[in-house]
Image: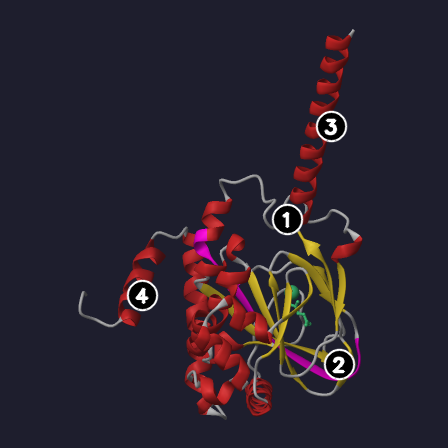
Amino acid sequence: MLSVSREAKVQFMREILLRYLPQGEQTRAQRHREYRQKIISNYQPLHRELYAMHPATFFAPQFLKAINDNTEESFRSIMSEPSPGVYTFEMFQPHFCELLLHEVENFENWVNEAKFRIMRPNTMNKFGAVLDDFGLETMLDKLMEGFIRPISKVFFSEVGGSTLDSHHGFVVEYGKDRDVDLGFHVDDSEVTLNVCLGKEFSGGELFFRGTRCDKHVNTGSQSEEIFDYSHVPGKAVLHRGRHRHGARATTAGHRINLLLWCRSSIFREMKKYQKDFSSWCGECNREKNERQRMSIAATKLELLRREGESTT
Ligand SMILES: O=C(O)CCC(=O)C(=O)O
Ligand SMILES: [Fe+2]
C-alpha cells in the first residue's frame, strides 16, 4: 500500500471505515454509490473539459493571482466584506459559467429523456442538481482544496476553515417553472461558496441574519447583522455555513447558482466537546460580553463600597 497513489490509499481507508458504519448508514452509502454509478455509466458529458481542474480557463485572472500569492493581503485585494463574515469576489470567467450552465442543462435533458429519478440537492429544493452525482466530484474537491481552503484558513479558521475535507456540490435554479425563493436556514457546512452562474434575472437577493451555533439558531438578530446581497453572474459569495440566510423570490428570468458546502470532519468532532462558541456565534459572543460587563460593574460597585467603608 505504501507505494500506491494517494487516491488508492484514500479508497482503501474509505472501504475500511465503511465497515464500521452502523448498518443503516452502510446500506444508504452503498445505495448512493450504486445511484452515482448508474448515472455515470449512462450519462454522456457535453463539455469534458469541465471534469478536470483547469485553473487558467476556469478562474478570473485576478482571482488566480491572489490564490497563487496566498497571503491575507492578496485575498483582501480582490475581496469585499460588505457585512462581517460575508466576502464577495469575482471568481469565474464568463465562458466557464456558460459551459457549466450548458452541462447542467444537458444533464437535465438526459434525466428527462431517460425518465431517471434524480435526488435533489437538499430538502429545500424541488429543482437543481447535485454536481457530485454526475461526475464533477473530483474537480470540485480540487476547487475546495486548492482555492477555497486557503481563503477559509485565513478568514474562517475558528470554524475549521483550514481543515475543510469534504464537500457537497450542487446547483440551485429559480424562476418560472423552477423554485421561487429559499426559506431562512443555515447550511450543513462549515464554509459555503455560492457563485451566481447566470442567466438574466430580477430579484433573488440573499438576506443574511448573523451567525449562530445550534443552541442559538432561532434567536433574534442585531441591526448590524442584517444584510442583503444582490447576485451578480460570475461573482462569488463566501460565508460560514452557520451564517443564517435565505434567498428572496426571483421575480423574472432564470437564476442558477453553484453551491459548494465545504465541511471539516475535525471541526465537527471537536465541536461535540465545546459549549462556548463566542469566537463565531453572535449570540454566544453577546452573552459573553454581557457577563463581562456585569462582572466589571459588580467589581466597581464592590470597590466603591470598600472605599466608602474605609473613609467612614
Ligand atoms: O439561492 C441562493 O443563492 C442561496 C442558496 C443557498 O443558500 C443554499 O442552497 O444553501
Ligand atoms: Fe444556504
- Is ligand 2 within 8 Å of the beta carbon of the residue shown at mark 1? no
Residue 69 is one of the magenta-drawn residues: no
In the rendered image of this protein, does residue 173 appear above or below residue 292? Answer: below
Scheme of image coloration: secondary structure
Left/right placement of residue 273 relative to residue 295 reads: left
Left/right placement of residue 231 relative to residue 58 reads: right
- Magenta portion: prevailing SS class: strand
The CA span between labels 2 and 3 is 54 Å
Q: Mark 4 vs mark 1: give the one in front.
A: 1
Identify the residue under disc 1: 281
Q: Mark 1 vs mark 2: give the one in front.
A: 1
Left/right placement of residue 6 relative to residue 258 reads: left
> Farthest top residue?
312
Give amino acid for label 2.
Answer: Gly
Q: Which residues are magenta?
A: 250-266
Q: Mark 3 vs mark 4: give the one in front.
A: 3
Quadrant containing the N terminus in the rendered view? bottom left
Q: Mark 3 vs mark 1: give the one in front.
A: 3
Identify the residue under disc 4: 10
Residue neighbourhood size for the residue with mark 4, other residues' Cα within 10 Å, grouped as few (<14), some (14–19), many (≥20): few
Give amino acid for label 1.
Answer: Cys
In the rendered image of this protein, does residue 138 appear above or below residue 281? Answer: below
Q: Do residues under tags 2 and 4 come within 8 Å of each other at their CB atoms?
A: no
The CA span between labels 1 and 2 is 33 Å
Residue 255 is one of the magenta-drawn residues: yes
Residue 281: x %, y % from top left: 63, 48
